Image (spheres, grey):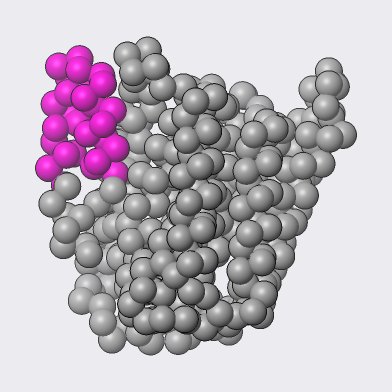
Amino acid sequence: MSRYLYLLLPAILFSFYFKYTGSEIAMFFTACLAIVPLAGIMGEATDNLACFTGEKIGGLLNATFGNATELLITIFALKAGLFSVVKASIAGSILGNILLVLGLSILVGGLKNGPQSFDRTHVSNQTSLMFLSVIALIVPAVFFHGSKDFLALEEFSLGVAAILIILYFAGISFSMRNNSEVCEVVEIEGKWSKSRSMLMLALSTVFIALESELLVSGIEPVTQALGWSEFFIGIIIIPIIGNAAEHSTAVLMAFKNKMDLAFEIAIGSSAQIALLITPILIFLSVLFAKPMNIMFNYYELVAVSLAVLIAQFISLDGESNWLEGSLLVGAYLIIASAFFFI
């Protein structure tokens, strides 16, 4: 899969070319394409490094770089004051992972292998963390609805962010015992040395940061030219771009009948976005002197809540089939279409 992603690397040169020629719309789309292979390189480097560093540091690496691409994109959006894009991308990542990625994984895996089983206890733990994140999003929308005390909302947001980060690392610690098996597989199949992995990780991070800045600077021209809302770009476009490489890996694992790993990628990534990335962005917004609260809009809350509820139902019996996958994909397409017309 990585070989096919590398074919998109020339988009990096084109994005810089369009930047200096003033073609902002072309720059936006080429930056989108360039981020996809760069995210794949970052993921491959992280997987290889995890086996050289051992389980604990390897787990920290995966936690840090698992959603680094989207974190970098949203940081630049945060600096630009595009709070609607940032919050929409958070909700969109959760929706994309649970409905689209998990749905495609179950669909492809079911068509190839028939009914598949997975560790429902571990998946249930992940979905429980997701329920907690939904509570953290709903509470401010209910208790601070119509309130003009913005300082209190900001302080509340910082407190909730701190709690979410603590619980995220508690969840990482609880599931750490399963990391050794993953590392053994990566260590056998990996082709990169430790030094090469570190070099590729550093280079991919730098270029993703550069491309993220180009992407964010092109959002306003795209909204004006194509009529797309910042909300739609944040909730659909950015999550798909930032997690494309990770998404393809989940589908491939399901195709190989490794549903535990496919569920871990889809559900685990959603938990990481909700419990780690979101709090980090809230704290960073304070450093940027542009405080962002944890108040999400009605559409985002409803969509995320339904997605988490669906994930919980699917994990109850520890088995999946292609029909369940098709239902998840269908739900994502319906929600995505609704967001396009809002």
Of residue 66 and residue 2, the one placed in the foreground of this image is 2
* Residue sitting farthest toward the front: 323
Answer left or right for 298 relative to 77.
right
Please provide percent x and percent y for residue 314: 61, 69
Q: Quadrant of the N terminus?
A: bottom left
Please provide percent x and percent y for residue 324: 52, 66
Magenta residues span: 9-35
Instruction: Tell me if residue 112 comes above or below residue 69 in the rendering.
Output: below
Please provide percent x and percent y for residue 58: 46, 73
Of residue 322 and residue 94, the one placed in the foreground of this image is 322
Q: Quadrant of the C terminus?
A: top right
Please provide percent x and percent y for residue 312: 66, 65
Instruction: Tell me if residue 339 comes above or below residue 264 in the rendering.
Output: above
16 drawn magenta: yes
What's the residue at 80%, 30% (across, down)? 153
Answer left or right for 9 relative to 335.
left
Of residue 75 and residue 241, the one placed in the foreground of this image is 241
Instruction: Tell me if residue 139 comes above or below residue 131 in the rendering.
Output: above
339 drawn magenta: no
What's the residue at 39%, 27% (across, down)? 216
Answer left or right for 8 relative to 184.
left
